[in-house]
Amino acid sequence: MALPTSPTSSWMQSLDFPSELFELGGSDYELYEEDDEFVLSVEMPGFDPEEITVSWENGVLNIAAEHDDEHRNQRRTYHQRFRFPKDVDEEAITAEYTNGILEVSLPVATDAGVTGTEIEIEA
């Protein structure tokens, strides 16, 4: 694999990521909220379910995966963190991996009210 020859923008250089990660033309996930739950679908082709770790801590969903291809002498890794704006019922989070797609369902906690301080609007 050849390194990219085009210069990266200054903000990408400060992140120390290879520019090819940003040239795919889209994200590898879809996140939406429906029926009082968040649903996150992540495209992760080529991984086996036992190579994927999904964890939840302090409002952040962490997805990590590692695949070693001994025949090609290659290692593939995936790591992504997602922060959620509402309280999630962490005991009810489920994950399913089918045909290269990881789908995580995160039900919104039913007893979670609006947090913070309401700001009065002056007329």
Image: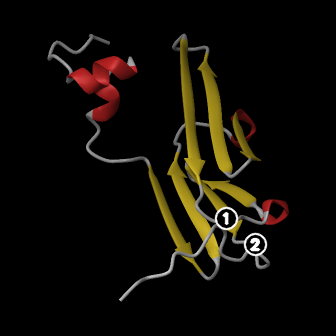
Q: In the picture provided, is 122 more to the left or to the right than 96?
A: left
Going 14% across and 17% down the picture, which residue do you hit? Answer: 6
Task: Please tell me whether residue 112 is drawn above or below residue 86 in the rendered image.
Answer: below
Could you tell me residue 74's position as x and y percent?
Answer: 53, 15
Which tag is nearer the camera, tag 1 or tag 2?
2
Question: Quick one: SS at disc 2?
Answer: loop
Measure how far apart labels 1 and 2 are at the Cα level: 12 Å
Q: Nearer the viewer, residue 121 or 38?
A: 121
Could you tell me residue 24's position as x and y percent?
Answer: 29, 38
Going 35% across and 89% down the picture, which residue do you hit? Answer: 123
Task: Please tell me whether residue 61 is drawn above or below residue 91 in the rendered image.
Answer: above
Q: Residues within 10 Å of mark 2 (few under 14, many from 20)?
A: some
Q: How many marks?
A: 2
- How is the model colour-coded? secondary structure
Whether residue 40 is visible? yes
Going 74% across and 74% down the picture, which residue do you hit? Answer: 112
Q: Nearer the viewer, residue 28 or 45?
A: 28
Q: Amino acid at mark 2?
A: Ala
Question: Residue 21 is drawn in which quadrant?
Answer: top left
Q: Which mark is residue 109?
A: 2
The N terminus sits in image quarter: top left
Q: In the picture provided, is 12 more to the left or to the right than 101?
A: left
Q: In the picture provided, is 2 more to the left or to the right than 117?
A: left
Q: Amino acid at mark 1?
A: Ser
Q: Nearer the viewer, residue 41 or 34?
A: 34
Could you tell me residue 89's position as x and y percent?
Answer: 78, 66
Q: Residues within 10 Å of mark 1 (few under 14, many from 20)?
A: some
Question: Quick one: SS at disc 1?
Answer: strand
Going 65% across and 58% down the picture, which residue do you hit? Answer: 104
Q: Nearer the viewer, residue 43 or 48?
A: 43
- Which residue has dot 1 on it? 105
